[in-house]
């Protein structure tokens, strides 16, 4: 019974979000552009420092682990291949999504949950303002745009981290490393990561909004729903990553 209600509530939320983000704008009810830009700054621009630092360290770690194995065969130059492909196809999108899940997905749940606890959602409805259009759609568009953008930043910084370690500690020639990275990377590698990031943004928004709207009590339940949104978002990111990785493996 509980599972069927959860599925029903999630399906209803997805249906209403799709309506207000795709269909309603065609009928003269546009997306709130100013609110979307504000959310883009909060979720995207403000996340650049933490995404950059973590991606840089992950690039270094990945290069070290690759070098540990490849130096046995005298093939250290292939560190560039491993770092470049791994970050653009997998680590860049998934690390960025996990960071945004903890930083922004939880904020979505806390904001909507607090408004639900304070009966502000009911107040919006009584004034004729649809809470999905007012609260969820700007967040959805913000993450759909900013998560791929953050992934691009993560890719560049992560590859630079591997480059920095390789030209210093491993003493590889900078030009050789760059050329090897360019030879290893394909357009489909980058596009794979960006498509994943776009899907992750949708999932994180829906999970955060769902957990926020499910608040029935006070501040304690807001905290519980916020924690649940982070756990569910990360789980969904991993599931989406598995799905898209399998899809691209068999069809590309």
Image (cartoon, rainbow, N blue to C red):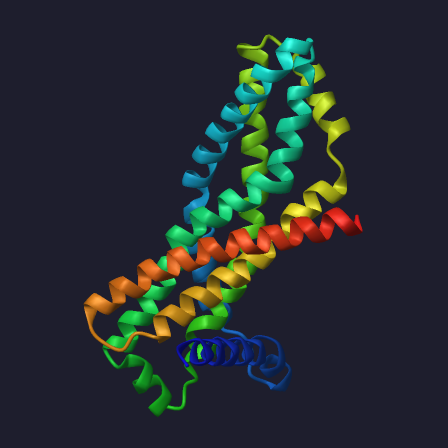
Residue in front for this viewpoint, 68 or 191: 68
* Residue 34, percent from left and from top: 47, 67
Residue 135 appears in the rendering: yes
- Identify the image quadrant of residue 219: bottom left
Residue in front for this viewpoint, 115 or 240: 240
Residue 139 appears in the rendering: no
Looking at the rendered image, the quarter that the N terminus falls into is: bottom left
- Identify the image quadrant of residue 209: bottom left
Relative horizontal placement of residue 190, taking residue 10 as reference (left or right): right
Residue under the image location 75 percent in, 44 percent down: 188
Residue under the image location 27 percent in, 78 percent down: 216
Q: Residue furthest front?
A: 1
39, above or below 152, in the image:
below
* Residue 58, percent from left and from top: 49, 30
Relative horizontal placement of residue 223, taking residue 245 as reference (left or right): left
Residue under the image location 51 percent in, 69 percent down: 33
């Amino acid at each position: 019974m509980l599972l069927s209600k959860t599925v029903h509530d999630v399906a209803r939320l997805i249906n209403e979000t799709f309506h207000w983000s795709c269909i309603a704008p065609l009928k003269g009810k546009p997306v709130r552009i100013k609110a979307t830009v504000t959310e883009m700054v909060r979720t995207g621009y403000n996340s650049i420092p933490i995404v950059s630092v973590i991606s840089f360290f992950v690039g270094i770690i990945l290069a070290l682990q690759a070098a540990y194995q490849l130096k046995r065969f005298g093939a250290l130059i292939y560190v560039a291949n491993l770092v470049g492909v791994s970050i653009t196809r997998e680590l860049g999108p998934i690390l960025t999504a996990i960071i945004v899940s903890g930083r922004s997905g939880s904020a979505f749940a806390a904001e909507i949950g607090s408004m639900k606890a304070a009966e502000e959602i009911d107040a919006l409805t009584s004034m004729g303002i649809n809470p999905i259009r007012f609260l969820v759609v700007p967040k959805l568009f913000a993450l759909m745009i900013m998560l791929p953008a953050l992934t691009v930043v993560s890719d560049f910084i992560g590859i630079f981290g591997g480059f920095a370690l390789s030209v210093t500690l491993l003493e590889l020639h900078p030009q050789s490393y760059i050329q090897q990275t360019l030879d290893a990377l394909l357009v489909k590698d980058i596009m794979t990561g960006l498509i994943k990031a776009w899907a992750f943004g949708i999932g994180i928004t829906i999970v955060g909004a769902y957990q926020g709207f499910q608040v029935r009590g006070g501040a304690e339940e807001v905290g519980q729903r916020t924690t649940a949104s982070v756990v569910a978002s990360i789980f969904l990111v991993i599931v989406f990553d598995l799905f898209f990785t399998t899809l691209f493996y068999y069809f590309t």
